[in-house]
Image (cartoon, grey):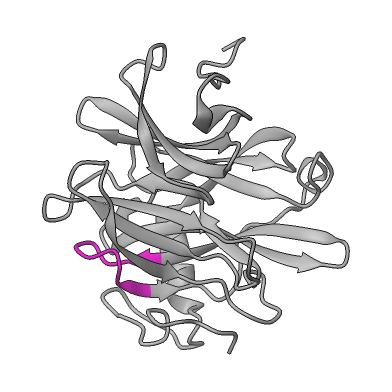
Amino acid sequence: DRQPSFLPDLHRYEEAWGIEDPRITRVDDEYLITYTGFSRGGPLVCLAATRDFHEFERRTVLMPPEDKDAALFPVRFGGRWGLVHRPASRAYDLGAHIWISWSPDLRHWGDHTIVINSRQGGPWDSRRVGLGPPPIPTADGWLVIFHGVKETVAGAIYRTGLALLDTEDPTRVKVRGDEWVFGPEESYEQIGDVHGVVFPTGFVMEPDGDAIRLYYGAADTCVAVAQASIGELLEYLYGHCVCRRPHRPGDYCDVAGTWVVQL
């Protein structure tokens, strides 16, 4: 498109200072878009819908400030919608973690649970973590591609890691990767408006059900695409869990599902 297809409505409180980071989930015959709106009270999570990407319907604000990095699951669990998101507080240096919240109607939310925490110390995901693209369904569970941030004296570095959630109960973490798998290497990822950033928010599954195209922001300056194999990502994840022990499909790591610290 020569022009943006979805522009902020600056007259709306939740979009007064702009919008960013849409994540698209197809549900039945429409696409549900969660995105960050920048209100005068801080960033919050908004919901819009479309069937053709030409006409959009703004639905509601899902989560108040400060919250972002949100996406819906493409299925309901026991009749409830699941939202992955990343609330944060600037008042305390406690890190920022990935949560799942539940709703019967996309308006009233509860049973909020942390599923992936930012680790303390010096790991690549020590400052904060946040969802990348919407959770990816696989035969082994929901594959989560998430970004992690480490603060250095030269600034923050954004890199990408993996986790696997249970198919029926995504609040159960089966495996969590210890190391990042995708980081800023190319010049357009290292130099830009914000140096040292790869920030994935979308994916397209190829017809073979294994190859995916991962769309990401590079250095907050351009949009780029990378390709990966679901099978290879899962194989790597099973061999590089935070517990430092190898796993097989069907395993539930007794460390990945707890409050993970650097081991």
- Residue found at the very far right of the displayed protein: 154
Image position, residue 212 (x, y; %): 45, 44
Is residue 173 rendered to the left or right of residue 126? left
The answer to whether residue 18 is left or right of residue 190 is left
Q: Nearer the viewer, residue 200 or 41?
A: 41
Specify the segment rendered in magenta: 164-174
Side (left or right) of 43 relative to 170 = right
Residue lying at 37% horizontally and 42% vertically, measured from the top left: 62
Quadrant where the N terminus lies?
Answer: top right
Residue at left 55%, top 76%? Answer: 178
What residue is drawn where x is 81% and y is 39%? Answer: 193
Could you tell me which residue is drawn at 63 percent across and 80 percent down? Answer: 120
Residue 225 point in image, percent of width and height:
60, 38
Q: Which secondary structure is most common in the magenta stretch?
A: loop
Question: In the rendered view of the protein, which quadrant contains the C terminus?
Answer: bottom right
User: Quadrant of the rendered structure where residue 169 is?
Assistant: bottom left
Residue 99 against residue 8 in the figure, above or below: below
Examine the structure image and report whether residue 171 is included in the region drawn in magenta.
yes
In the image, 114: left or right of 244?
A: left
Is 70 within the magenta? no
